[in-house]
Image: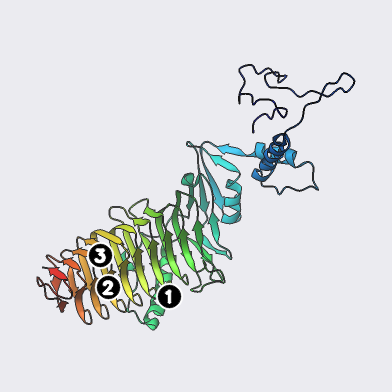
Amino acid sequence: MRYSQPYGLPDPPAIPPSRPPDGSGWPRYVNGNPVVGLAGSIPPATSFDEDQLEIINVIINAGLVPTHADLTQLWQSLEILFARQFITTPIVKTVHGPGADFPDLHVAMTWVQNYTITQTGSVTFLVAAGQWVYTTTLEIWHPNANRIFIQGAALKGGAPSFGNITCTGYSPSARAVDATNQLVYLRSVFATELNFTGGVAGIRNFSFGITLRYLLLTGTQSIGPNPYDGRGLEIYADVWYDCMAVWGFGESGIRVWNCTLRAATSLSMTVCACGTYGIHVLGGGYIGQTNQETIIASCGQIGFRGFGSWNWFDKLTSKGNGNTGVDLYQGGFVACITWMDAHHNGSTGVYMTGQVNLYNQMTYLHENATFGMVANGGWAQVYNGSFYGNGSFDIDAQAGANITAVGATFAGAVTPPVNTVGNANAYIWH
């Protein structure tokens, strides 16, 4: 706020060159004296309005609700604000289990809200080994979330790889059996499990940069009453992960909204047995690391869906899903540096529509119920690798799709025939 001078006087500078403690650098208010005919100063509206607004802002920023019933709120607010502290060095706090600093992550995140974490500081919440049940979504809001780490206990075994994740088929009965076996296996690897009950969402992040490490997030394969329920990891701001697994959420394992989910190391991400999508990226992107694996299995409809998003994998496996292994549309982009493997899906290994792009060094699309790949437009480079055991076509290219499949082997039919224009100017280079 600025100093509000008596009504009718010219505005003084925001900071007068002469500013003694008695305020004589500003136009001063004077009392009227009718005996000698001296008019008193007229207070302008801003002298009342701005003073109140300044005080109200202090009260609100301290987390209080302004009320006429309490005339000590300014003092309370100052005490609250003065009590806020800074974290200037790396610290570690324990969560769950005997003797822990916090009984759960809800309490831990509420505590850290009272602190500013400086560039030299960080907070690691070490979550004890065990299965910890949550009945409500863990929401993350902190302006310094890039200096916060939520870390489970050390892994009990090596990080999951595609061969460790059971896949016997895509039918509902096969997926149900596989889901059970997958959970047993994941619990043999991850010592820390956060189990979200009642179909609620698991972790929902709104703040840039938090790191999640060595965590198994599990759901109840259901969707709660909130329209945003049923999602294991839902992010609206960038998140880093370091070996995680998500199992059994009713809608999707991971949903990314116009931000980025990034691998912090080469350790894997595993998503299994979720209701509709394994990983769903709408805008933004998914970024892996060299030698990092992403494994998606046994989800109800689609393993990985990229909607207008940029996604970089080193190794991607999507198998045993009810419909499609990898689905790209509305400008979606996927690059797999080492390989992509999509098999035993209920319809198609890879489905592309619109102006989308797919770039793979090695491509294995096999034993899908109908198609290895369907491309309704777009561009794909599926070098090397192999296509076999797909129900109708290894590749079905339509609507001007341009497929480069140099070095790939086909055990089944492709349409149009390789090196021939057809299906509304589609072409398969081979």
The quadrant in which the C terminus is found is bottom left
The quadrant in which the N terminus is found is top right
Per the image, the residue denoted by label 3 is 340
- For this view, does 140 lie left or right of residue 355? right
Which marked residue is nearer to the observer: mark 1 or mark 3?
A: 3
> What is the spatial separation of the Cα atoms under label 1 and label 3, in whole angstroms?
25 Å
Among the 4 quarters of the image, the one containing residue 176:
bottom left
Question: How many marks can you see?
Answer: 3
Image height check: is 255 above or below 145?
below
Q: Which mark is residue 180?
A: 1
Q: Amino acid at mark 2?
A: Gly
Per the image, the residue denoted by label 2 is 349
- Tell me where residue 171 appears, x and y as whole percent: 36, 82
Find out whether the residues at labels 1 and 2 contact each other: C-beta distance under 8 Å. no
Q: Amino acid at mark 1?
A: Thr
- Tell me where residue 104 appears, x and y as whole percent: 58, 56
Answer few, some or many: residues within 10 Å of disc 3's Cα (few below 14, many 20 plus, some between 14 and 19): many
